[in-house]
Amino acid sequence: MADSSAFRRRRDIFLSRLGAYAAIIPAAELVTHHADCEYPFRQNSDFWYLTGFDEPSAVALFLPHKPKGEQYVLFVLPKESAAEVWTGFRWGTKGVLDNFNVDISHPLDALPKLLPHYLEGAEGIAFRVGKHPHLEPLVLKTWSEHLQKLPRSGNAPLSLIAPCPILHDLRLRKDDFEIDRMRIASKISAEGHQIVREFARPGMNEKDLQAQIEKYFLEKGTRGPAYGSIIAAGDNACVLHYTANNALIRDGDLVLIDAGCSLEDYYNGDITRTFPVNGKFSGEQKVLYEIILRAQEAAIRCVHPGDNAENVHLTALKFLVEGLVDIGLLIGEVDSIIEQGAYSHLYMHRTGHWLGLDVHDVGAYRLGDFHLKLEPGMVLTVEPGIYISDRLPVPKGQPEIDERWKGIGIRIEDDVLVTKNSSEVLSDIASKSLIDLEN
């Protein structure tokens, strides 16, 4: 089990920010893969963040309007030996009370009867509408019944809000426990990249490399890959979310690997490296790689308290466009090219995203017209790239692409923690300098 004190601290903060609203946070449901077979279970990240409980179908109530000792209630699947033979161990209501610091536990089938009682006295309900179709009818029915009683009772939860702004603001700023976990996730992910690069040879299949890196993740005790690993050789690297991973790797190809592990408690790494499979960049490959590496290094220098993710992106973008102008793949003034988006056939994504329990983690990037300032404890990826192919039309006024550039796709991605005064690259043991990638 994960550190129970970390979850208790989070619940205390969440309860304090709810005011007098009652929050209903459901666990994930099992998802059918085909026929009666299900995908491996993956817990809902919001539910996990507050509970550390890794079973499906549970429902957590957070009730700041109730007395101490009655504020954290968990409804769970009951102990049932016949079900456990098929799907594995369940904690049950007693196990939850004894091991998860729950105030009160109930079997899941008691929720319809008891939910009205637990919502009594709350000023409102915090529940994510549109996300939990199995539970939403019960929540809305219970709320409606309370509102109908309002003229007689004089007391009812009057409004329904989403808990996301509170929860996701908490999740955006990692505490010391989470930072330690993310260091481990990034380290294992980076080690996997090192191993697969040394393993790779011309004539292999992309799946050979996928098997190697995911094997390492599993050997290190993780859940496995945090997302569908991208193993893209040659022109396949120009497909941003390429996951077929079944092509022959040819001599002279660059191989782009975008892969990271997910720990047992769901913290993730997300790293991309691009390297020449034969140990030597061609002239065109090297020129583009150097542009992207300079852009990434400049963008990482922007990761510090008080800056923002938008400036991280714009810094990388300016370096990329300047480099592409220098080599003739773009023409014009750099600022004008950026303003017109005339680079977007070569670079069509943002330079990063938040990272945490979700690979594309929750949290705002801007509040109204203002970009959210970076603060210690935030973790984001920095991942500029260039992708040269015929898949997108060349914008008007930009030069047609010479054949010698086509089929080159390069991305460099690191996981970066905002620290008190600067930043820490959590994935820095994965080599990315030219001297380290060539042999």
Image (cartoon, rainbow, N blue to C red):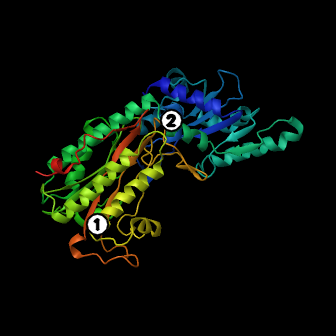
Which quadrant of the figure has residue 194? top left
Q: Secondary structure at mark 1?
A: helix
Residue that lies at the very extreme toward the front in this rendered image: 333
Query: Could you tell me residue 146's position as x and y percent?
Result: 79, 41
Above or below, comparing residue 351 to residue 265 in the picture: below
Identity of the residue drawn at 54% across and 25% down: 8
Instruction: Name the residue type under label 2.
Output: Tyr
Along the line of sight, which residue is nearer the eye, 276 or 9?
276
Asked if residue 197 lies left or right of residue 82, the reply is left
Along the line of sight, which residue is nearer the eye, 380 or 321?
321
Query: Could you tell me residue 280's position as x and y percent?
Result: 13, 57
Q: Quadrant of the N terminus?
A: top left
Asked if residue 279 lies left or right of residue 28, the reply is left
Asked if residue 267 shows in the view, the reply is no
Distance from Cα at disc 2 to Cα at disc 1: 47 Å
Q: Secondary structure at mark 2?
A: helix
Above or below, comparing residue 325 to residue 216 in the picture: below
| Mark 2 or mark 1: whose residue is earlier in sequence | 2
The residue to which callout 1 is attached is 326
Along the line of sight, which residue is nearer the eye, 221 or 281?
281
Instruction: Name the residue type under label 1.
Output: Asp
Q: Which mark is residue 49?
A: 2
